[in-house]
Amino acid sequence: MRSRAALRAASRGLRSQLDVRGKVAVITGANSGIGFQAARQLAAAGATVVLACRHPGRMAEAARAIRSKHPDAIIDEVAIDLGSLRSVRAAASAIANRHPHVNILINNAGMIGEPGWRTLDGFETCFGVNHLGHFALTGLLLDRLLAAPEARIVTVSSTAHRVAHLNPQDWPNPRVNDIYRAYAASKLANLLFAYHLHRQITAAGVVMRSIACHPGWVATQLLSSKPRSARRRAGVAALRAIGAIVGQEPEDGARPLLLAAAADVPSGTYLGPTRWWRTRGPVGLEQSSADSQNASAARLLWDLSGELSGVEFAQLAAPAVAGHAVQQAEVRNLGELWAASNYWTTEPVSLILPDGAELTVRSATADDTAAVEQLHQRCSSRSRQQRYLGGSTPAPGRLRRLLDPPRGLTLLATAARAEPGQPVAMANLVAEGDEGEVGLLVRDDWQRRGVGTELLRRLLQYAEDAGYRALVIHTEAQNTPMLRTVARLNRSITIGRDGSIVRMILPLTDGTPRGR
Ligand SMILES: NC(=O)c1ccc[n+]([C@@H]2O[C@H](COP(=O)([O-])OP(=O)(O)OC[C@H]3O[C@@H](n4cnc5c(N)ncnc54)[C@H](OP(=O)(O)O)[C@@H]3O)[C@@H](O)[C@H]2O)c1
């Protein structure tokens, strides 16, 4: 716990960075915890703050608490129950009537319910409140956001998103009896939404930012529910006790939200505390799970959320992308669509590295031969030797086969900004029987930035989906970065050594294709 003096000093420091005077900031769940602290600090820094809360009494209490500390605070109050789409519509039109523009929308409210709980519209509560309500609110306020010079939409997720498995068949009602899994799934949905919104903004060419963040571990009311079962009550009590010891103050938990709302942070990024397993400490750029960056899944969720809520983001509608006709089909069975969308071969996915750099990952074709030759030329001879185990760079004919293998997959990571379209890394999986042999080449200036790990993770997923029994990786014994990259996959590995060459085998499935 930090002393009051330390908190006051930190908050003064942050406030001086918040250039929000005269801006309109809407924040959901602003009566409690992290949302309250974010609202208070934005008001203290001169923003007009719209508290958007479920209980009018608690909201009025929060407004009073802010005014008592900051008598000049400009505060508006709008009642909203994110579990009722009707209430969301009423709140959005109240905000739009009172404010010609909205500069900052912070989608903060969140809850963990009980198994079987449903929103007023009949959706599982975490999905309905944490994701769908915010999706609808954002879409309904889009005109007002577009009326501001460079609006920001901040979506509050959680490190809990990492334990969620991407399972579009489970939207909107996860078939889990574990409410924490439902919560984690809703926090994954928050990220899929924030990233897809970023992609829509970019495609539409509008000036606006979608930024995601998480607060770390903060002692708040989030775990205040009193579950029916004694076992779950004990679990909640234990989590609360741990939270009271290791959790940050809500004031610190609000920092990522405030930086996302006002600091110089690019759209499409994810911010959060960087220390103690991301529970606390200085705020920095974060990397979210591979699932959260799955652009196909994000598009499905976007379309489904539009259908369920009846809210369209027409102002951001971009021309349909070739190769995605399947997405425009009437969607009734998400599972079928998921299986039908050729995830591995058609879908470029954007990837944000921990240092904030943006890449696109896509499958290669023989047409990439010239660009990949250039990639080889721009790698040091040491990197090329490590990739080809001392052998020479493949001639164009072999390179073409490597890029478009009869069985297997080659992924390219291409730079998004500085050198658009230029490959900076290549990962090959060439099938031999029911095993896949993997090779990795990363341009020297992109090494140690997480690119190799991401490419390898995707190849691993591809191999599992396709039903390979194992992945095999040969590398030089002194190629420590490659050994570390493989270790980061956290899989069981059998290691053998033949002189200076190490052979790593990652056992996978029983050989049955899992499909997608
Ligand atoms: N605390 C953490 O360690 C932690 C970690 C990761 C992420 N987060 C995220 O941080 C955000 C804020 O949570 P917190 O920790 O500050 O929890 P909190 O103190 O419980 O605040 C949650 C807020 O959301 C509001 N809310 C809940 N259901 C709502 C609904 N149906 N409609 C409108 N508002 C609703 C609550 O209103 P009422 O007061 O009326 O219930 C409350 O104002 C959440 O998105 C949470 O997932 C928190």
Image: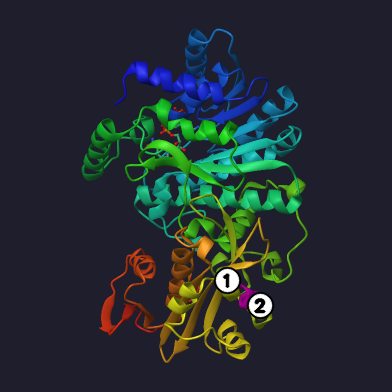
Residue 368, labelled with which disc? 2
Q: Amino acid at mark 2?
A: Asp
Residue appearing at x 37%, y 30% in the figure: 221
Q: Which residue does the numbered mark 1 point to in the structure image?
A: 412
Give coordinates of residue 488: x percent, y percent. Answer: 35, 63
**Viewer can see residue 113:** no
Residue 508, labelled with which disc? none
Residue range of the region highlighted in magenta in the rendering:
371-375
Residue appearing at x 53%, y 61% in the figure: 445
What is the secondary structure assignment of the residue under circle 2?
A: helix
Residues under labels 2 and 1: Cα distance? Answer: 9 Å
Give coordinates of residue 309: x percent, y percent. Answer: 63, 47
Please tell me in which quarter of the rendered image ligand 1 is found.
Answer: top left
What is the secondary structure assignment of the residue under circle 1?
A: strand
Q: Is residue 48 above or below residue 489?
A: above
**Viewer can see residue 34:** yes
